[in-house]
Structure formats: C-alpha cells, structure tokens
Amino acid sequence: MNGETVIDIRHLKTSFFSKKTELPVVDDVSFSVHKGETLAIVGESGSGKSMTALSIMRLVPTPNGEIVDGEIYFNDRDLLKQKEKEMFKVRGNEISMIFQEPMTSLNPVYTIGDQIREQLTYHQDITRREAHQIGIEMLQTVGFSRAKEIMGEYPHRLSGGMRQRVMIAMALSNNPQLLIADEPTTALDVTVQAQILELMQKLSKEYDSAIILITHDLGVVAELAERVVVMYGGQVVEEAPIDELFDDPLHPYSEGLLNSIP
Ligand code: ADP
Ligand code: MG
C-alpha cells in the first residue's frame, strides 16, 4: 500500500424508495483507495457497482434514489456533508468519472475541440487559445497522432474507442486525484479495450492518481488492479489484494466468479 488515503468510504448506504418501501442498493459499503493505487470493483450486473460510484460523485438518480447513511472522506472532508456548490467543484477538478458509453457523455452537436475548450475554461482560469493548446496536448497524450484534426471533428465521426480516449483525456485534463472508471471498455472491441487499459495504467503511474475501476472482467482486474472489492447484492463480500483473491478466494461468490473465467 503506498502513501496517503485519497478516499475512505465508510458504511455507505444508498437506497431507492418506492411509496413506503426502501430498497437498499448499496448496503453498508466500506473501502478506501490510496494515492497511485488502482482498486477494482467487480460483481455481477445489479450488484451496486455503479450506484456506489454515483454515490461518491453525489449523482444518485433523483427523486427516488438517496444516500441514507455513511461517510465518504475525500482528503479528510466528508463529501456527504458538502453543499452542492462545493460538490460541483469536486466533480470538475478533483474527481473525474468515465462512463461505459462515451457517446452519451459527448454532445453530438459540438466538435471535440469545442467540448474540450469548454470544459477547460469552465474549470480553470485560462483563455480559449490556451485551452485549445492544452486540448491538443491532451489528445496527444491519449494517443492521437493527428490531435489537431480530431479537435475539429464531431463525435459521430469517431469510433467508440476514439471517443472513449477523448473522454479519458477530458477526465484527466484537470489532474484529478481520483478517477472513477465505470466499465470503461465494455462497449469496445477487444483490441481497443487493451489500448484503453494500457493507457489508463500509464496515466495512473504518470499522474499518481487513485483509480476506482469498475468492471465485470477479471482479466482486466488481474492486469490493472492492486486490490479488488467484490460486491454482491449491494454489499462488499470480499476485499483482498489481487494475488490473494486469485489464489484463495474467501467468499463462495468470488470463487464462482473466478471459476467463470474462460
Ligand atoms: P451494477 O452497476 O453493479 O450493475 P447498479 O449499481 O447499476 O448495478 O444497480 C444496483 C441496483 O440498483 C440494481 O438492482 C438496479 O436495478 C437498481 N437501480 C439502479 N438505478 C435505479 C433507478 N434509477 N431506480 C431504481 N432502481 C435502480
Ligand atoms: Mg453498472
């Protein structure tokens, strides 16, 4: 384990309410992530992985969803106690999130350059010209050789893998201390998946960011993560360094998960 704790989640509980019934979907979840560390969250569909991520960002779907209990310490302040205005800053600058399908995060009617410049000038005190230059460098960092031309393209003109690389560039543009990637490669084909994962690995080392990587792909976990949290039915059923999980899974569900690898 290296260095300081970036995020420390304690007894988090998030529920959906319908009429008078409460359905907990994140149920007493605790874990922490350190600087420079990649923590994987695995678990079957519906086990509460995305709701955990959205809870950290305080983006639980309203009006039915609600964080009902727990603490989320991020740099020693409890995110659940921050005002919305403060959270807005946290989301823009300190925690970034990448979602499964990048098309839904990019606006189809603006060019990539428009969107990158907009994001950069929104969160940093720089001119559009400076933002443009930084944007080109960002795109180069995520592997675009013709970054200048990409700036002028509309999202639909790029492949899924290219769009996801744009999203990673944007997510990293403010040097977030924590990157949450929710199934970042699920929608992509295998070769592109490998590229994206390699890129995330490189960047996490370069920037020393903490990463929460949500995936149902244990191959990806073995490749990238140092530690893994296994979720089942809204709860953490196992947490272990990656080698331990693979060598000796404690929970029957983790064992089943490992046995399911082809
Ligand atoms: P995962 O990401 O592990 O596949 P989710 O965190 O998305 O799972 O979902 C956890 C549970 O929360 C699921 O049972 C899902 O049906 C439920 N859920 C997610 N979004 C909503 C919503 N908007 N309204 C009601 N239930 C929801
Ligand atoms: Mg999900």
Image (cartoon, rainbow, N blue to C red):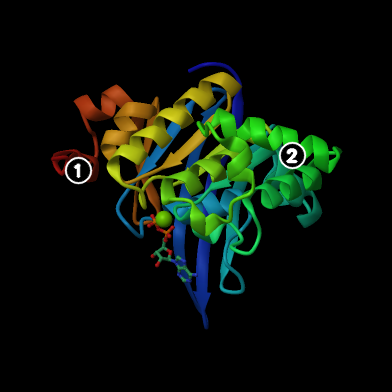
Q: Is mark 2 within 8 Å of ligand 2?
A: no
Between disc 1 and disc 2, the foreground one is 2
Structural crowding at the residue carrying mark 1, measured as other residues with C-alpha within 10 Å and reported as few (<14), some (14–19) or many (≥20) = few
The residue at the far bottom in this view is: 19
Name the residue at 52% across, 26% down.
204
Residue at coordinates 55% horizontally, 54% vertically from top-left?
54
| Residue indicated by mark 1 | 252
Judge by depth and name the residue closer to the eye, 101 or 43. Answer: 101
181 with respect to 7 (left or right)? left
Report, in whole angstroms, how far the alpha carbon at label 1 lies from the one at label 2.
51 Å
Residue 38 seen anywhere in this rendered image of the structure: yes
Q: Residue 116 appears at what percent x and percent y?
A: 68, 46
Residue 132 is labelled as 2
For the point 32% across and 48% down, the residue is: 43
Please report whichever mark, 1 or 2, sits nearer to the chain's N-terminal start.
Answer: 2
Quadrant position of residue 90: top right
Q: Does the image show residue 238?
A: no
Q: Nearer the viewer, residue 158 or 187?
A: 158
Measuring from the top left, give residue 198's x and y in whole percent.
41, 28
What's under tag 1, amino acid-wise?
A: Pro
Q: Residue at x 63, y 38 (%)?
A: 148
Q: Are marks 1 and 2 in contact (CB under 8 Å)?
A: no
Image quarter of the C terminus: top left
Q: Is residue 241 left or right of residue 24?
A: left
Q: Secondary structure at mark 1?
A: helix
User: In terms of image quarters, where does ligand 2 lie?
Assistant: bottom left
Residue 84 image point, x, y percent: 76, 56
Of the residues shown, which amino acid type is indicated by label 2?
His
Label 2, secondary structure: give it: helix
Q: Which mark is residue 104?
A: none
Which of 113 and 207 lies nearest the eye of the viewer? 113
